Image (cartoon, grey):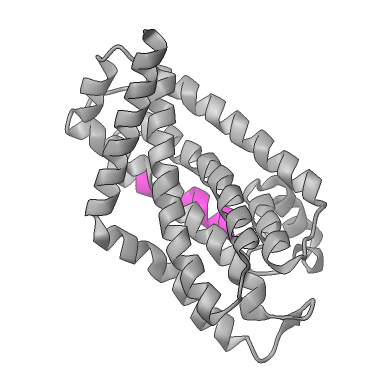
Amino acid sequence: MSKIIQINAIKAIITREIIVFVREKERIVSSIISPLLFLFVIGRSLNQKITIEGYTYQQFIFPGIIAMNILFTSIRYGLYLIWDKRVDFLKEVLVAPISRTSLFIGKAAGGVIGAILEMIILISIGNFFVLKLSIIQIILTIIVSFVSSFMIVSIGLSIGAVMKTMEGFGLIMSFITWPMFFFSNALFEVKSTSYIIMLISRINPFTYSVDILRKIMLDYSTFKLSYSISILIFSTLVLSYITTKLFERIDIQK
């Protein structure tokens, strides 16, 4: 009976998050504006001057821009956790007979689904104007993006679990997301950078998300595929565990 309650609770939380996501059409539009600017402004401006492994620069950064959309959309989802505290929705959920782990899974899954839906929109645009992908490539991209999004959503929810204000969340989010993006291999080839940047990129788990996506889309990667997958899965599990523990001590005071 307890397991049934937990499953139903997770389904209910996911359903609620999807409804909120669908209602906020402005959020969907604003979330894909920045990736499109990077793809078509920066990508096209350097398109005639740079080729990497036989691909135009715009094609080379396309997997990185897909990952960028996942990064910023997923981590921003932690902001809604703070909002839930303010409107007392979270308090109502916490007094229900469900575990904090179920709450985390429901919230994280809802955020991942929203990020994947936005990513599909971006892929559809890029597939028409930038790089034609096969059905298999699209499916593999969605699978990798799902795991990557779960990892980033965990970071966002962990911040939301300990922060009390949206302003504070915004500062921490910017401090984390932009370094993760710029110190990955989203916009450049890591092997051609300095030793320090390469070292930071190797520590950055987001680097391996980009590398796997680039392998799927362009059949080119900086690291061994098995190594990148291992790092991505390990990072997702560790961050999910940490966030679950933070949810057990979550502060619901406004």
Q: Quadrant of the N terminus?
A: top left
- Residue 51: % across, % down: 74, 83
Magenta stretch holds residue 144:
no
Q: Left or right: 221 with respect to 178?
A: right
Q: Left or right: 190 with respect to 217?
A: right
Quarter-of-image position of residue 249: top left
Quarter-of-image position of residue 7: top left
- Residue 25: % across, % down: 25, 60
* Relative height, residue 72 to residue 227 (above, below): below
Look at the image and tell me whether residue 99 can be seen: no
* Relative height, residue 81 to residue 217 (above, below): above
Look at the image and tell me whether residue 15 can be seen: yes
- Residue 41: % across, % down: 50, 82
Farthest-out residue, bottom: 48
Farthest-out residue, top: 1
The residue drawn where x is 43% and y is 69% is: 34
Q: Left or right: 158 with respect to 54?
A: left
- The one of 49 and 121 positioned closer to us in this rendering: 121
Farthest-out residue, front: 135
The residue drawn where x is 17% and y is 33% is: 87
From which residue to which does the magenta span run?
169-181
The residue drawn where x is 40% and y is 43% is: 111
- The one of 213 and 77 positioned closer to us in this rendering: 213
Most common SS among magenta residues: helix
* Relative height, residue 1 to residue 146 (above, below): above
Magenta stretch holds residue 178:
yes
The residue drawn where x is 41% and y is 17% is: 248
- Residue 232: % across, % down: 67, 42
Q: Quadrant of the C terminus?
A: top left
